[in-house]
Image (spheres, helix red, strand yellow):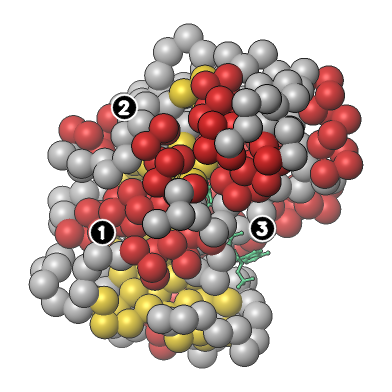
Amino acid sequence: MKTEQPLRIVLAGGGGFLGHALIQYMAHPVASFTILSRKRGEQTKGAKTVWWDGEHTGDWCKEIDGADVLINLSGRSVDCRYTEKNKRDILDSRLKSTAVLGEAINQVAKAPKLWINCASATIHRHAEDKPMDDSNTEFGTGFSVDVCKRWEDAFAKCDTPATRKIVLRISMVLGKQGGVLPVMMKLARRGLGGTMGSGHQYVSWLHEKDFAGIIAACIEHDDWEGTFNCSAPEPVPNREFMRLIRQAAGMSFGLPAAAWMLEIGAVFLRTETELVLKSRRVVPSRLLQKGYSFQFKNAADAITDLTQHH
Ligand SMILES: NC(=O)c1ccc[n+]([C@@H]2O[C@H](COP(=O)([O-])OP(=O)(O)OC[C@H]3O[C@@H](n4cnc5c(N)ncnc54)[C@H](OP(=O)(O)O)[C@@H]3O)[C@@H](O)[C@H]2O)c1
C-alpha cells in the first residue's frame, strides 16, 4: 500500500485498549480513524465513532466502503469467570463481528485494501519446553483455544477476493494506561507482586508501541498475508516477569501465590487462573523473517519504558 498517502482506517471495536493504542501510536499519516462501537454517542479523541451492533449490516457499512484498512478489535473481554453465559459472549462477540465484517466487505462498492483480524497467541499449547513459532502451530486444548480456532476459522471463511487478509495472534499487550500492566503495578505496590504458581510458566508480551508498529508494517508491505504471531521475541518466565514488575513498583517483596491460592483469588476477582498460569512461550518468527524491527525486545526495557514518568 502506498504509505505516503494518508489512510482511511476503520477500527471495529476500536474504543477499547488496543484501539486507543493504535490511534495514539500509528506513525503513518492517517487521514481518519473511524471506530465502530456498540455504544451510542461514544467519543474518542482522534477518531470518529459510528454505531454498529457487531452482528448485522447497516448504515455503518458506508464507513467500510472505500476505506484503506479495516481492523477488527471486537471481542468481549476474557478477563471474567468462564460461566456458560460469559463463554457464549466471548465466542459470539468474536465470530459474529468477524462474519458481519466479511459480509460488509462484499456488499460495498469499493472493498478495503486490507483487513486485519485480531486473534490470540493463546491458540498455541502450554509450552515451557520450547518456543512456539508461527511456521507449524502446535495447538493447545480447552475453551480458550477452541475460541481462538473458531475465531480464525470464521475469518478464513470470509471470501474477500479484493481484500488482503492478515490474522494477528496477539500476546498480552503491555500499555501505559490500559491492559494488564497498570493492574499488575497496583497489586505489586500492595505487596501482591510475587511469583504466580511455579513461576516457570512463560509470559509472552508485546509493548503497545510495537503493536502499532506491527499494524503499520502490515499496511506498508503489500506482500504480507496470513497468520503472524504478534509477540515480542523474548518471552520470559513468570518468576522473572514478576521480578521486573516489583522492581518497577519499587517493592523488594511480593507475596508469592501458589496455584491453589490463585484459584481461590480468581473466584473473588471474577477471573480465571488460566490467564496467568498457562505457559505462553510464543515467538514472532514470521515478523522477524520479514524484517520487522521490534522497538522493545526485552521485557525489562518495555516495563521500564511504560512505568517511568517521562
Ligand atoms: N489486549 C491484549 O493484550 C490482547 C491480547 C490478545 C488478543 N487481544 C484481542 O484483541 C482485541 C482487542 O483487545 P482490547 O484489549 O482492545 O480489548 P477491549 O479493550 O476489551 O476492547 C474490545 C472492544 O470489543 C468490543 N466488544 C466488547 N464486547 C463485545 C460484544 N459482545 N460484541 C461486539 N463487540 C464487543 C468493545 O467495543 P464497544 O463496547 O465500543 O462496542 C470493546 O471496546 C480483542 O478481541 C482481544 O481478545 C487482546
Give me the disc on residue 155.
none
Q: Residues within 10 Å of mark 2 (few under 14, many from 20)?
A: few
Give me the disc on residue 76.
3
Which mark lies nearer to you, 1 or 2? 1
Instruction: Report x, y in % for residue 309.
Output: 46, 55
- Helix, strand, or loop for circle 2? loop
What residue is drawn where x is 58% and y is 19%?
239
What residue is drawn where x is 29% and y is 51%?
214
Taking depth in this image into account, of 140 and 216 the one nearest to the observer is 216
Number of residue marks? 3
Q: Which of the two labelled residues, at mark 1 and mark 3, occupies the earlier sequence position?
A: 3
Q: Are marks 2 and 3 in contact (CB under 8 Å)?
A: no
Give me the disc on residue 135.
2
Location of residue 34 with respect to 55 vertically, above or below:
below
Q: Which image quadrant: the N terminus?
A: bottom left
Check disc 3 and give the amino acid type: Arg
Taking depth in this image into account, of 180 and 143 the one nearest to the observer is 180
Taking depth in this image into account, of 34 and 205 the one nearest to the observer is 205
- Helix, strand, or loop for circle 3? loop
Q: Residues within 10 Å of mark 1 (few under 14, many from 20)?
A: some
Check disc 1 and give the amino acid type: Ala
Q: Residues within 10 Å of mark 3 (few under 14, many from 20)?
A: some
Taking depth in this image into account, of 47 and 176 the one nearest to the observer is 176
Q: Quadrant of residue 279?
A: top right
What residue is drawn where x is 50% and y is 55%?
176
Q: Which of the two labelled residues, at mark 2 and mark 3, occupies the earlier sequence position?
A: 3
Instruction: Report x, y in % for residue 14.
Output: 50, 69
Where is mark 1, residue-wise?
Answer: 216
In the displayed structure image, the side of residue 184 where residue 47 appears, left or right = left
Q: Are marks 1 and 3 in contact (CB under 8 Å)?
A: no
